[in-house]
């Protein structure tokens, strides 16, 4: 929802004041909107765009070189008045006439048409082009009823580039109409937006559903459907837009995958991956695609796909340089002389499989079973580990442990299958854990497994309980050296140290490995539970440390769970 | 929430695939992340940044000329592995060494340090700088424990600009550390983010509250408070950051007001308005401020203020050109020769007060009373009008009618106080309505009041009921001419036409104006209710038209409410 405002009734003015301060080098305010900070040069047609606000960067964000000369800024989702449009048009116009362009909404049509009439009476040749890209808003037989959504951006960009190139007013109007005829958009929405000061969204979409064809002011859509996977959404948007490919258009398209406000860049890139593949399958070549927030609707969730079917002229204008507060195209400096990279993958070295003894290979197979048990335990515990990590951390521990144990298991299994001994299975597993899981726990577990492996070696004929206990102590040493934490700092060391020490003590006292390990795992579990009483000392701000008292450490807990899982593997079969 | 993904476990890879396709002219993928599409030139230090993903445009979005040479991309909110950092560092490094820089998180510190060691072993001189700008994460006495948030952007930008300028590795490392020492951030959050595939947010903030000092991965903050007005939030952020102004720093600052994902540009500009004023009050000059989404946290709601206290070197590097997928600075083409605008306001002409008769002035005062009644009625009906407008429109009708009637009342009152007759009061009111309310209803009501005024004139000695009825018919004619709707199209005309016709008929039949108006208002109300059975015919897509059946038209309803309110004014005082 929209949360930050001073007075909802002055929201647009307050927003403009901040915008104009930030972008004072590029734009200045005039009554009704903004114009470029530089005068329109003699002979240049002025292009003034506009509509209601709440769509940033549309439309004040695209005033600048190569794009609009001015933007008329109405209240949120509300057409500016004819007076506003007149005022901005008058300020922007030089001696070569004026093109107004807005989306095709009744209020904008009336107000911009009235402003056009007034400017003409004052001797300024003025034209108006209304954008009708939204294919969901009326059938192809009633194109003139369609509203303008993200395709506004294409038409405004093309018109602005044409004016910058020196087209006369007839030419700018012609190419703007041509761009509109060649531009199609289909959008979906997942959640509504709230007005500043509003307690309820303008509209809602049931959870797990999407509205198809919703307008950028929350106007109801033409259908509703289950929220699909990203790839299926891409398919739906591409097929919807391509069903209206204009007759006679070629195989080159400009494209916008537009986010409406709370559908983030990461999600848009995931969708774009499939959009790009589908367009390529259709034999279309995408020129200068834009993926991001260009025409938003406050905090609405959703996205739209716009295609402009290019010819030579439209492609040149779509690709022409632009330099505005929110959108730039073209190189900031001359193309670098540097060589272009090939982009060839830089593969890491595969872990070498060293010669090994049968005894060490047998130990390696036990390690694989242990990794299987750990991966299963982490999968079961993922949600709970995330929950306790979120108390003083970022809640990613469960996810990281699942990724790490699965990667370790896969790599260990491959190594064992290739005939690796204990060391090589553990090193392969540790390296994979660190590489795939990332994060703090990934690197620490990875280093620990590698150290255990190095101590066990590939060359023992037999691996004794004492060998295992020594190797685990070597793992503890590696962990301590890398993590820099001390016992009592509320880290995995608080569980690992008692585990490793009890294991060594019981083995030295003559216990068999399975029994010693079970006792050690119990000590680790008790110690992990006891971390609930500790305050973290390393890398945590004091308030977070205070907050974490009463919750056990996530890293210590996951270590104890892994130790218990391995104990089950070591028990003699019954 | 994060809704669009194919497989949560491959989200980062899928995101990168889309990103690399869109920005293929600027960046290429390597194992573990991305590097510039051009080779690092001989003699240039490579700057490689990174951390977990979910923060776009941080950090893959800032790879390019003048900024980073590469970005290591971990999973969402998770440190990349040492192998990833090694791989990207190796790919990016030329012959002049490598600077790694990340936020100060345990996982990043370990993994990037391990990668540094490996690269050094291979003969690549490598340094690491960890950013510690978040003042809420540890007290000033423990700066080394602070984490990096939006200040990452400043340090990375400065280091990238220094490397581009030709600094050697010692110099790039030195200025990066210096930028970090001079950079402070304080952030707040209003709502948590969800991981791809997650059903629940990582954390929640109670409605109407804000978390102070929350981390960009949702780590708990240091306090919680009521969500303030935008200006009060600005005050809190500015005073918090300025409390840690570094000793010896001057009066020039770079600034970032960063949005975390769902706090939109419009809101950020409202906050910035006050931030800019407060910084000016403190005697600080802001250089090249950035207001927008630079370091996000998926769909988290919140924002942060970063200040970098500049000296001459830092200012030059902060302002240096950059050209990356998500961030550019510097002019795309040489500065235009065009004259800079003065930015002087272009005032509209004040409505001229014409000479008027006492009778017309008396009528003008009745008009003011009528406008008062209409404004009160619209205030009462605002929510309901919004609700019915949202069925097939954008739900802004109630807001627009409130703005319009209030603006009309203020202008009409001023005109009457200045001695205006009926015409001039109505024209002033109509022009103000159209100018301030904007939208469709604003322009239509404005034109209608102006036409009524023009027909009444300022020069009648007495205004009869018949004069009023004729003027209302003139208003209907203006409305129909401008709006192009026909009766039955489900617009305000459906209520206005019967109202005007009954008024004319009853007056012609000998009724006094109050009684005639009351009957006419009743006819308008009945007609407005009957619009529930109509389908809109103008400017609405067919599915929206279907959906609106059963709901009365908002414009007809507000017209009927206004007519009824004026009836109360015309009744003789009892």
Image (cartoon, coloured by chain):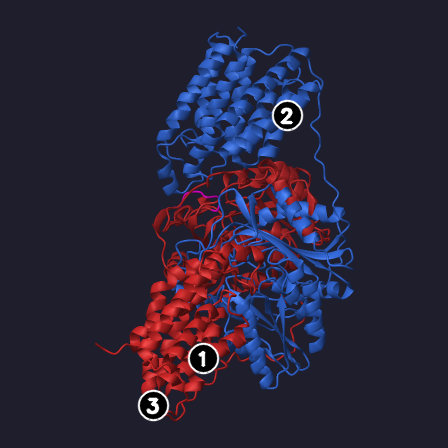
Chain colours: A blue, B red
- Residue most extreme to the left: B574
- Measuring from the top left, give residue A294's x and y in whole percent: 59, 59
- Measuring from the top left, give residue A20's x and y in whole percent: 50, 69
Residue beneath label 1, please?
B473
Q: Around disc 2, counting alpha carbons within 10 Å, would you say few (fewer than 14), some (14 to 19), or many (20 or more)?
A: some
The answer to which quarter of the image holds residue B231 is bottom left
The residue at 42%/66% (across/down) is: B527
Q: Chain of mark 1?
A: B
Left/right placement of residue A488 relative to residue A151 reads left
The vertical placement of B282 against A292, above or below, is below
Helix, strand or loop: magenta stretch: loop
Residue beneath label 3, please?
B462
For the residues beneath circles 3 and 2, the answer to whether they share a chain is no
Q: Around disc 1, counting alpha carbons within 10 Å, would you say few (fewer than 14), some (14 to 19), or many (20 or more)?
A: many
Q: Give whichever of B180, A288 is nearer the camera.
A: A288
The residue at 46%/18% (across/down) is: A521
Dot 1: what SS? helix
Q: Earlier in the sequence, mark 3 or mark 1?
A: 3
- Measuring from the top left, give residue A310's x and y in whole percent: 74, 61
- Measuring from the top left, give residue B245's x and y in whole percent: 42, 58
Q: Give whichever of A227, B102 is nearer the camera.
A: A227
Q: Give whichever of B50, B443 is nearer the camera.
A: B443
Residue beneath label 2, please?
A410
Q: Which residues are magenta?
A: B216-221
The answer to which quarter of the image holds residue B16 is top right
> Given this view, does label 1 or label 2 mark the residue nearer the observer?
1
Q: Give whichever of B274, A457 is nearer the camera.
A: B274
Q: Are marks 1 and 2 in contact (CB under 8 Å)?
A: no
Residue B57 visible in the picture: no
Q: Chain of mark 3?
A: B
The residue at 51%/19% (across/down) is: A565
């Amino acid at each position: 929802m929209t949360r930050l405002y001073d007075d909802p009734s002055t929201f647009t003015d307050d927003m403009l004041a901040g915008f104009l301060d930030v972008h004072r080098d590029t734009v200045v305010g005039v009554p009704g909107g903004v114009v470029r900070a530089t005068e329109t040069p003699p002979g240049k047609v002025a292009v003034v765009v506009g509509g209601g606000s709440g769509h940033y960067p549309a439309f004040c964000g695209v005033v600048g070189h190569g794009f609009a000369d001015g933007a008329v800024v109405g209240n949120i989702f509300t057409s500016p008045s004819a007076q506003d449009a007149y005022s901005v048009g008058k300020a922007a116009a030089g001696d070569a006439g004026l093109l107004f362009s807005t989306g095709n909404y009744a209020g904008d049509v009336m107000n911009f048409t009235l402003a056009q009439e007034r400017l003409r009476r004052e001797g300024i040749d003025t034209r108006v082009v209304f954008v009708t890209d939204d294919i969901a808003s009326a059938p192809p037989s009633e194109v003139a009823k369609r509203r303008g959504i993200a395709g506004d951006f294409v038409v405004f960009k093309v018109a602005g580039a044409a004016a910058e190139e020196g087209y006369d007013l007839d030419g700018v109007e012609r190419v703007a109409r041509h761009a509109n005829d060649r531009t199609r958009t289909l959008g979906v929405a997942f959640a509504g937006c709230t007005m500043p000061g509003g307690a309820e969204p303008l509209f809602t979409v049931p959870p797990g559903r999407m509205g198809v064809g919703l307008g950028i002011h929350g106007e109801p859509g033409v259908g509703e459907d289950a929220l699909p996977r990203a790839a299926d959404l891409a398919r739906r948007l591409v097929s919807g837009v391509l069903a209206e490919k204009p007759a006679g258009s070629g195989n080159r398209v400009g494209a916008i995958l537009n986010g409406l406000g709370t559908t983030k860049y990461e999600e848009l890139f995931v969708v774009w991956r499939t959009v790009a593949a589908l367009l390529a399958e259709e034999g279309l070549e995408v020129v200068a695609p834009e993926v991001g927030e260009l025409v938003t609707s406050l905090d609405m969730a959703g996205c739209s796909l716009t295609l402009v079917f290019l010819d030579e002229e439209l492609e040149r204008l779509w690709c022409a340089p632009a330099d505005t507060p929110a959108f730039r195209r073209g190189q900031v400096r001359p193309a670098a002389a540097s060589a272009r990279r090939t982009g060839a993958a830089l593969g890491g070295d595969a872990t070498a499989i060293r010669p090994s003894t049968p005894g060490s290979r047998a130990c390696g197979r036990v390690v694989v079973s242990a990794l299987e048990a750990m991966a299963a335990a982490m999968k079961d515990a993922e949600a709970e580990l995330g929950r306790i990590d979120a108390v003083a951390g970022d809640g990613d521990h469960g996810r990281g442990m699942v990724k790490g144990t699965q990667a370790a298991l896969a790599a260990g299994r491959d190594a064992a299958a290739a005939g690796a001994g204990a060391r090589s299975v553990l090193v392969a597993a540790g390296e994979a854990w660190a590489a795939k899981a990332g994060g703090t726990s990934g690197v620490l577990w990875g280093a620990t497994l590698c150290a255990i492996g190095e101590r066990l070696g590939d060359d023992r004929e037999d691996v004794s309980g004492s060998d295992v206990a020594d190797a685990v102590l070597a793992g503890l040493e590696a962990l301590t050296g890398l993590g820099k934490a001390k016992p009592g700092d509320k880290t995995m060391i608080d569980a690992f140290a008692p585990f490793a020490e009890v294991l060594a003590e019981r083995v030295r006292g003559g216990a068999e490995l399975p029994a010693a390990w079970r006792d050690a795992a119990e000590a680790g579990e008790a110690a992990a539970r006891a971390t609930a009483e500790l305050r973290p000392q390393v890398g945590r701000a004091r308030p977070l440390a205070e907050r974490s008292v009463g919750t056990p450490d996530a890293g210590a807990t996951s270590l104890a769970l892994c130790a218990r899982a391995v104990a089950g593997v070591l028990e003699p079969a019954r």
